[in-house]
Amino acid sequence: MRGLLSTILLMTALAFARAANADTVVPNVKGLTAAAAIAAVQAAGFEYNILSESSCSSPGIVSDTRPPEGSIVLAVPPRVNLIVSQGGVGPLEGVTVPNVLNNRLEQAQKSLAAIGLTAIDTIRGTEPKGKCPTPVGPPRLIDSVMETKPSAGTLVCSGSNVVVYRLMYQRYQEPKGPCP
């Protein structure tokens, strides 16, 4: 009986500790100095570890957290890893991906290369629809950029790749009779 009572008390204590800790959400500290980030996570009730990585951020600036901002941490006590930039390796600098949507591939490649990014051309096909679609005519490549990854406005390191998606268009039609 004592063993069962001890187990129930332990489980209840753990449940209360987790419930009290359920609102422990990782704060957004990206872009802060390490000292300011430490103060912010401690104010939110976290313990912390400092991890150093190379990034496009200036040395001493928090570039990320693990777990990411907004995550709920149930561990008791809650702990977050602060990823602090050592700066870039060599001439790395942060650049913003420009908007090259609707540009022809050649122009998109030039725009990206002008700021130190490399365009990776990727072609997507149209999806056939219907019960038994039949291709009509040859496929046609649409030379305009339809999407980029990362998207326009994203900060990346100079020298990064940007995938530019173009569309291979194929017309389809339903047969007039039953499906072959």
Image: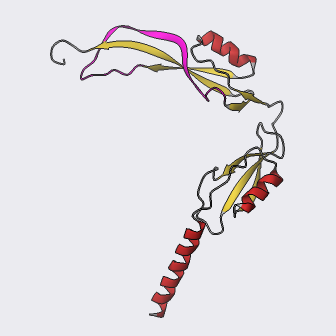
> In the current view of this chain or complex, which residue is farthest to the top?
137
Res 45 → quadrant = bottom right
Quarter of the picture holding the C terminus = top left
Res 105 → quadrant = top right
Q: Residue shown at 78%/58% (left/top)? A: 39
Against 170, residue 156 (above or below) is: below
Residue 13 position within the rendered picture, expressed as x and y whole percent measured from the top left: 55, 79
Describe residue 124's horizontal placement relative to residue 82 as left or right. left
Residue 130 position within the rendered picture, expressed as x and y whole percent measured from the top left: 27, 22
Describe residue 44's horizontal placement relative to residue 134 as left or right. right
Describe residue 16's horizontal placement relative to residue 63 as left or right. left
Q: Check residue 139 for magenta coloring.
A: yes
> In the current view of this chain or complex, which residue is farthest to the left?
178
In this picture, which residue range is highlighted in magenta?
Answer: 126-153
> Does the rendering let one see residue 48?
no
Residue 69 position within the rendered picture, expressed as x and y whole percent measured from the top left: 64, 50
